[in-house]
């Protein structure tokens, strides 16, 4: 199988896994909003902040290092694995000890019980994440997809059962642990002989991986704070109920964000790594990925912006439709943010993860200031701050990362997405008009809005950029045939 065939096959199976996972997660949240009060989702967001923060130290950038290094011996693989297990145990101990302090910070007693239980996920992840990364490196996305579909389906069924039995917020926590344990144990058992784990550990064998992953971990750590500071600030200033409403809107957009772009991203990382010594090829592939992501993502996020009220009504229920402005602003933010996603794969391919660290330092300095000012007023102001930040970051992103890595000019970079962004902006101008449409119920209204906006966006794009449109259509047809 050629590299292109492997890439297209990877996209297909990666799509199946990601779409299935997103569907199960949305169904799960949709069901639980009918059983849980808004405050519970706020408490869950507070607890997840602690656990997700710990996951950064669990990975230590090793995922990026494994993808970057072409040949990994059995001994190196085992040393990394046992180091990861040891770190997971230490992290869980720290989570358990810190739970009361977090509870006091938010003045929410229940967090002292929720955090230690949810923290078990750190240990479960350490069982199989390294093996999942190897499957990704080998472009074995079919295995990953099947494992994820099975585990998320069982997690969904567990969540529904527990919710109907009155477990409240713990129905989501227990179901998360169940699907995580099942998935990671399965990845461990599916490991082939080449990458099986044996009782061997040598710290010196992990150092090359830690060196490559060190910059990635530092970047990921800072990026986490720049990305999740909103949870910390809103939870402290506005309380769990407002955080719950904001968190559910954010989760909805994040599910979309985590569904579309990774379809290309997870396959792009190992493919770009194969080109790490071919600068021009690497540059061309990166620029093409920007065009494709813009073409696919912008119209989808546009539908969310225009139909935010209908989407919230369908997924969460009538009482959540008041958060439509928050959802629209966050959808705009993530639409523009998708333009930067391929840069992570580029960092891995070129070994310049240090540039990612510099970029996130800038973000962590600027983002919290905007978020804090917004939170002094309401959650709508926080969402608006994110929308403004997405546009402000385009120029410094190019200067700090793209120019040093591949000597890409600003014109080359911006030309890949500027037409999509202009059409995107023009389409948003239809929002006041489309917002007046109300037909029968949320579903029909949402369908009508979607059809109108897709016709407008597609027509404008084809008239301005026919070549890209037909090229992408040909690639999609090729993908389906594979």
Image: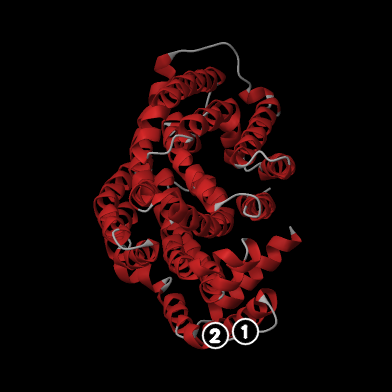
Left or right: 391, with 466 as reference point: left
Measure how far apart labels 2 and 1 are at the Cα level: 9 Å
Query: 14 or 479: nearer the eye?
Result: 14
How far across and how far down the image is residue 81, in percent?
53, 22
* Residue located at (57% from left, 32% from top): 129
Can residue 393 be seen here?
A: yes
Q: Nearer the viewer, mark 2 or mark 1?
A: 1
In the displayed structure, would residue 231 be above or below residue 443? above
Mark 2 burial class by Cα count in 10 Å: few <14, some 14-19, many 20+: some
Task: Compare residues 350 and 277 and report the one nearer the observer.
Answer: 350
In the figure, residue 307 lies in which quadrant? bottom right
Marks 2/1 in contact by CB < 8 Å: the verdict is no
Task: Give the residue furthest to the top.
Answer: 199
Residue under pointer 2: 434
Residue 271 in sight: no
Where disc 2 sits, the SS reads: helix
Q: Which residue is mark 1?
A: 438
Residue at 56% from the left image edge and 72% from the top image edge:
309
Give how far across and how far down residue 403 sits, in percent: 29, 58
Determine the image quadrant of residue 467.
bottom right
Q: Nearer the viewer, residue 67 or 153?
A: 153
Residue 183 is situated, as x and y percent measured from the top left of the image, at 66, 34
Alpha-carbon neighbours of circle 1 within 10 Å: few (<14), some, or many (≥20)?
some
Q: Quadrant of residue 354?
A: top left
Q: Quadrant of the C terminus?
A: bottom right
């Amino acid at each position: 199988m050629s590299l292109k065939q492997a890439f297209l096959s990877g996209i297909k199976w990666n799509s199946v896994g990601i779409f299935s996972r997103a569907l199960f997660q949305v169904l799960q949240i949709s069901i639980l909003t009918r059983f849980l009060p808004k405050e519970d989702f706020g408490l869950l967001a507070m607890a997840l902040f602690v656990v997700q923060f710990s996951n950064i130290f669990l990975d230590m950038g090793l995922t990026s290092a494994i993808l970057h290094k072409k040949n990994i011996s059995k001994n190196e693989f085992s040393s990394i694995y046992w180091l990861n297990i040891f770190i997971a145990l230490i992290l869980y101990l720290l989570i358990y000890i810190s739970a009361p302090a977090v509870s006091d910070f938010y003045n929410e007693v229940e967090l002292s019980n929720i955090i230690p239980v949810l923290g078990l996920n750190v240990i479960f992840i350490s069982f199989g994440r390294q093996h999942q990364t190897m499957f990704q490196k080998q472009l074995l996305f079919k295995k990953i997809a099947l494992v994820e579909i099975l585990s998320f389906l069982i997690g969904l069924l567990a969540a529904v059962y527990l919710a109907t039995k009155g477990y409240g917020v713990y129905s989501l926590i227990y179901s998360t642990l169940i699907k995580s344990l099942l998935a990671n144990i399965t990845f461990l058992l599916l490991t082939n002989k080449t990458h099986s784990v044996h009782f061997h550990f040598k710290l010196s064998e992990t150092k090359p991986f830690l060196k490559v992953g060190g910059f990635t971990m530092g970047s990921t750590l800072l990026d986490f704070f720049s990305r999740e500071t909103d949870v910390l600030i809103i939870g402290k200033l506005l309380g769990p109920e407002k955080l719950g409403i904001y968190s559910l809107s954010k989760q909805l957009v994040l599910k979309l964000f985590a569904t579309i772009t990774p379809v290309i991203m997870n396959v792009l990382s190992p493919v770009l790594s194969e080109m790490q010594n071919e600068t021009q090829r690497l540059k061309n592939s990166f620029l093409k990925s920007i065009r494709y992501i813009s073409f696919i993502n912008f119209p989808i996020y546009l539908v969310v912006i225009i139909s935010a009220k209908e989407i919230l009504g369908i997924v969460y229920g009538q009482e959540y439709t008041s958060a439509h402005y928050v959802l629209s602003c966050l959808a705009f933010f993530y639409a523009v943010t998708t333009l930067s996603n391929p840069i992570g794969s580029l960092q891995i391919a070129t070994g310049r993860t240090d540039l990612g660290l510099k970029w996130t330092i800038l973000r962590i300095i600027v983002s919290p200031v905007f978020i804090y000012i917004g939170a002094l007023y309401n959650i709508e102001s926080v969402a608006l701050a994110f929308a403004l930040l997405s546009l402000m970051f385009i120029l410094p992103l190019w200067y700090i990362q793209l120019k040093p890595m591949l000597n890409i000019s600003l014109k080359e970079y911006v030309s890949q997405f500027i037409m999509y962004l202009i059409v995107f902006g023009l389409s948003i101008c239809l929002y006041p008009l489309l917002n007046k449409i109300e037909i029968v119920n949320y579903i029909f209204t949402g369908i009508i809005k979607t059809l109108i906006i897709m016709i407008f966006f597609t027509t404008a794009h084809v008239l301005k950029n026919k070549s890209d449109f037909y090229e992408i259509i040909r690639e999609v047809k090729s993908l389906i045939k594979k």
